[in-house]
Amino acid sequence: MACLHLFFFLLAHTNVIPLGYTNVMSRAVPETTMPQLLSDNDAAQKKVSHASRQIPQAIIIGVRKGGTRALLEMLDIHPEIVVAATEVHFFDWDDNYQKGLSWYRDLMPLSYRHQITIEKTPGYFTSPRAPERIHDMNSSVKLLLILRDPTERVISDYTQVYYNRLESHKPVQAFEDVVFKNGALNTKYKAIQRSLYDVHMAKWLQYFSNDQIHIVNGDTLIQNPLPELQKVEHFLCLSPKIMPSNFYFNQTKGFYCMRNEGKERCLHESKGRPHPTVNRTVLDQLRMYFSEHNKNFFSMVNQSFNWN
Ligand code: A3P
């Protein structure tokens, strides 16, 4: 049933654009390569003569630092998936939302009718407005949420801000100084707030059922990406096309990298940066703080994760 929904949405929301027209924001598919792309598909698909931009049928809603870029780029290996190159921020930024759905669609890459379009904007998960807005767009959209151990996610979030500040020559603070205020855990710290998965999930479950939100285990995606991607293929009603040969472990980077159509590629250097060593008591306090929230989250989504 869920797969049929996706099929009908695909048919209904296709905005046909003649071949050769590309949008600079999207992954450009040069006109001359398109017939070649189609030549690998079945006879019915070969009849398709127009590419179009489609409203996404699936959205990676977050969480920030959960592994959203890795998930998007790994899914992009699948021949029936096309992905938006940039984070669109349509449903979480009012200025963009006011521009309307056709503005949003114009930012999507060209695709054929048998393909599904995915965009990722990690800010959606923690946005108070995004669930209702996405539901208004398509109440049967498929949502992908990639989560990591919440404490690990806070450290990753801090690390990203730390490097951003260094690059723009702004002062930086040690992790412990940001996480603690007046000797107590600074629960107002945004990075901590973003790791309260139950608080954010509650808003999504007001609009979507659990079976519309597939949770990807971001810790597992780092260790062994393929099984997590196969679950996503199944969730998106796609035949399994992502293979073990699409990945290899890069010792220098310390992460899996991708191999597709003869090309090898790792994620940008800003993904997979070393984290600071954090004091044990600070870690314990964070874990204790998240513990009840995690339990609450597990019962909301009827599954549990190995978060300490
Ligand atoms: P760190 O840089 O803190 O290690 P996002 O894309 O949502 O910002 O998430 C970034 C995180 O993706 C990285 O956080 C990293 O741990 C994780 N990740 C998962 N798989 C990865 C991969 N194959 N290469 C690099 N980073 C990966």
Image (cartoon, rainbow, N blue to C red):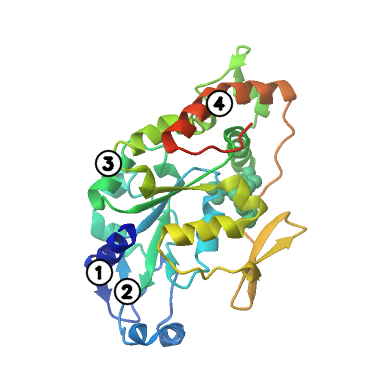
Res 290 label: 4
Q: Which residue is drawn at 56% across and 49% down?
A: 67
Examine the rendered structure and indicate whether residue 168 appears above or below residue 29. above
Which type of secondary structure does the marked residue at label 3 adopt? Answer: helix
Q: Which residue is drawn at 37% across and 38% down?
A: 127
Q: Which amino acid does label 2 sit on?
A: Arg
Examine the rendered structure and indicate whether residue 111 appears above or below residue 208. below
Which type of secondary structure does the marked residue at label 2 adopt? Answer: loop
Nearer the N terminus, badge 3 or badge 4? 3
Q: Report the side of 107 relative to 147 (left or right).
A: left
Residue 212: percent from left, percent from top: 36, 49
Quadrant containing the C terminus in the rendered view: top right
On the image, numbered disc 1 is attached to which residue? 11
Query: In this view of the protein, which residue sits in the foreground, 200 or 7?
Result: 7
Residue 58 picture quarter: bottom left
Q: Distance between the residues labelled 3 and 2?
A: 27 Å
Residue 131: percent from left, percent from top: 32, 41
